[in-house]
Image: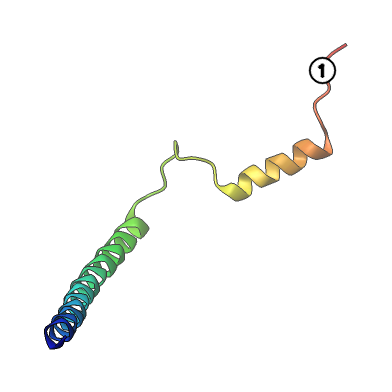
Amino acid sequence: MKLVALLLFVMIILTLVNGLVFMKKLIALQKENNSLLKQLLENASSIKKDENAPMPHTELEKYKTQFMQNPYQPPK
């Protein structure tokens, strides 16, 4: 019975150590991810707008509202 209790205790300790190691690696990856996102944000602000870029959502909503006020009527 003491052997089973010892093995369970060892398994619990190993699980906790594994979780701590995993969390440490996860935190390091998150910090690297944050630094890369900051670099992308800095680079994105310096890039000029492309004329072939998709239309912004606000423009689409404006055109949709105009269309709904004056719906299309096919010629007779």
The outermost residue toward the front is 1
Taking the spot 34% from the left edge, 62% from the top edge, the residue there is 41
The secondary structure type at the circle numbered 1 is: loop
Q: Quadrant of residue 9?
A: bottom left
Describe residue 65's horizontal placement relative to residue 16 as left or right. Answer: right
| Quadrant in which the N terminus is drawn | bottom left
Up-down relation of residue 3 to residue 74 (above or below) = below
Q: Is 62 left, or right, of 16 in this rendering?
A: right
Q: Can you tell which quarter of the image residue 12 is in? A: bottom left
Q: Which residue is farthest top? A: 76
Quarter of the image containing the C terminus? top right
Q: In x, y percent, where is residue 43? A: 29, 58
Q: Residue at x 69, y 45 (%)?
A: 62
Give the residue at mark 1.
Answer: 74
> Camera-side residue: 9 or 71?
9
In this picture, residue 56 sits left or right of residue 36: right
Q: Quadrant of residue 50?
A: top left
